[in-house]
Amino acid sequence: MILVLDTMGLGPAIGEARNKGARVLFTDVKGVEDYVVRALLDVDVEAMNHNAELVAKLWDQTKHCRVTSPQGTDVSFELMPRKSIVGDGALTEDGEVDFYPCTQVSIAPVEETINGMIVIDASDSVQGVIDTPYSFIMKKGVITAVEGGEEADIMRGWLESLNDEKIYRLCHFSVGLNPQAGISGNMTEDERKLAAVDFGFGSQDPKFGGTVGPCPYHEDIMLATPTIYLDGKEMSGGGKLNPEMGFEELRKYLGGHHQ
């Protein structure tokens, strides 16, 4: 196993190591040390991972997924026949990569079916926490416009500076499941916020089975409290999972007691 605290310049080396069977666990605790402790010790991990397995099962059976948000997100895409990946922080297979602390579920939507508008209202991996939401216009899985104010201008400039068409392509859709996570600007925490959505762009892990493939760059954008619909049925919204679908309530622990 390889524990990676800083990914700078390690992409090719990590890829080679994974091809030889190395298991890679990423973490970045700088500035979120308190969260990292709470995310492990103050969470019902068994219930959280039960919910993750249920999300994966539902997604694997979903034809049409739609994501909306109070800020204006309205994007839809197909999931079948793609398969979900549960990021539970446990390395159980050779060549596996995961993130610590857990938990998150991810899938690669069928790229050419991704259309609509994504409003980034929480954070992104380029700028950190977002003060003023901005938007990506998506057509057939590709960002065709970046709209908004100063933060949109910064993102647009960053994308253009890479001179790589793959960074405009949506490569994964993920939902967080840890009730201790919030939005800090550190993706180790943000991506695992309960019922928050992360869309990734650029380099795509081969295990997703998508068509984007690898590239030197990757970015993530966060939506704090979106609503996810699976074939028209609400799976989550307002920061909560829908109990009518069988999800367990994820209560926080304080000093060994439920909150």
Image: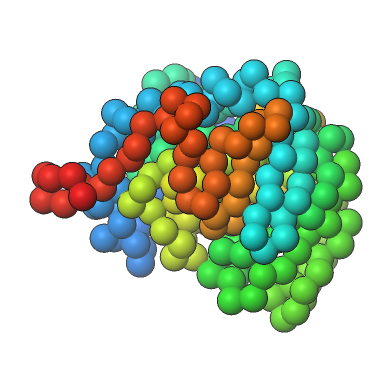
Residue that protrudes farthest toward the bottom in the picture: 150
User: Residue at the spot x=38%, y=26% of the render?
Assistant: 50
In the image, residue 209 sits, relative to residue 224, either above or below, namely above
Q: How many marks?
A: 0
Quarter of the picture holding the N terminus = top left
**For this rendering, which residue is in front, 43 or 91?**
43
Q: Quadrant of residue 206?
A: top right
Q: Where residue 162 appears, x then y in whole percent?
A: 77, 61
Q: Where residue 257 appears, x then y in whole percent?
A: 13, 45
The answer, for residue 19, to whether it is visible in the render is no
The answer, for residue 54, to whether it is visible in the render is yes
User: Residue at the spot x=64%, y=60% of the render?
Assistant: 70
Residue 159 in the figure: left or right of residue 122: right
User: Residue at the spot x=65%, y=37% of the render?
Assistant: 229
In the image, residue 58 sits, relative to residue 200, either above or below, namely above
User: Residue at the spot x=32%, y=30% of the render?
Assistant: 47
Q: Where residue 191 appears, x then y in whole percent?
A: 50, 50
Q: Where residue 22 appears, x then y in whole percent?
A: 45, 27
In the image, residue 232 sits, relative to residue 141, either above or below, namely above
Residue 8 in the figure: left or right of residue 215: left
Q: Quadrant of residue 52?
A: top left
